[in-house]
Amino acid sequence: MKWFGLLGLAAVTALVAVTHRDIGTVLAIWFSGKQTSGATLWGLSMVWWGRAGKLMQFMAGCVVILDLVGPDRLRAIGARATAKVSDFRAWRSRMHEAGQLLELQRAISEWLITRIGSISKVNGDTRRWQLVRHGSRYLPDQPWFTGPMIEDLRNTVLSDLPRAHACTDAHAEEPCAKQVGYVFDRVKEFVRDGLPPRERKLVDQREAVFRVENHGCTAISCAGSGSSCSSPASGWTC
């Protein structure tokens, strides 16, 4: 230990010997009451040293505050913060997975009905839709639904569509708003019935978040309502 002390003293002495001119200059400027911003010490400007000093004062103040709080309370605060971060990450992961399931639901709906444009009205835009009667569309990779299953759904829904509502208007190839809503409801029911309980619960949770963000509008009804939602969420592109 004696040798370490002597080595430390020698190092400090050598440092002062090398920089004694800078120290003298800085002290002379400081005692004269002038600004030291243009001076340097150990190759660094006094502005840098001033900022370093303020940082050390801040750290010293933090140490005093943390000492007053106490280690037990600090550990409890840290544990609660860690738990909240962990819960948030888990929630974000679930919402991301649920968003992918809603995207699957949207992709399946495009096997039955597709948007072809919109009509501008005074109270907002009204979407125009067209039924898809044959052919395959994009289907995300997943283990629950296949192309033939969706084609069977399409055939059933299109067969039931004329009797699906009490609208007395004449229908051309372009479905009316009630028929559009019926198609999306059938797709939603089809997806819910085909998903395992865990995935179904995720979709319900994401729908609940979407409903809050869009003033009661759900992801699937947003697409089939015929009018734009006020603030579309990431789970569905309105």
Image (cartoon, rainbow, N blue to C red):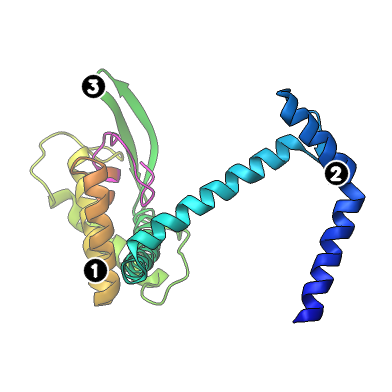
Q: Identify the residue at image location x=35%, y=62%.
A: 88
Residue 76, labelled with which disc? Answer: none
- Residue that mark 1 sits on: 201
Q: Identify the residue at image location x=30%, y=60%.
A: 154
Could you say where residue 170 lies in the image, as x and y percent from the top left?
A: 18, 34
Q: Which residue lies furthest to the left in this view?
A: 166
Distance Cα–Cα, label 2 vs label 3: 70 Å
Residue 43, labelled with which disc? Answer: 2
Q: Are marks 3 and 1 in contact (CB under 8 Å)?
A: no
**Mark 3: which secondary structure?**
loop
Could you say where residue 237 lies in the image, as x and y percent from the top left?
A: 39, 45
Nearest the viewer among 40 and 166 is: 40
Mark 3 or 1, nearer chain start: 3
Which residues are the magenta region? 223-238
Few, some or many residues within 10 Å of mark 3 (<14, 14–19, 20+): few
User: Is residue 85 shown in magenta?
Assistant: no
Could you say where residue 67 lies in the image, as x and y percent from the top left?
A: 39, 62
- Residue that mark 3 sits on: 123
Front disc: 1 or 2:
2
**Mark 2: which secondary structure?**
loop
Could you say where residue 85 lies in the image, as x and y percent from the top left?
A: 38, 63
Type of the residue with mark 1: Lys
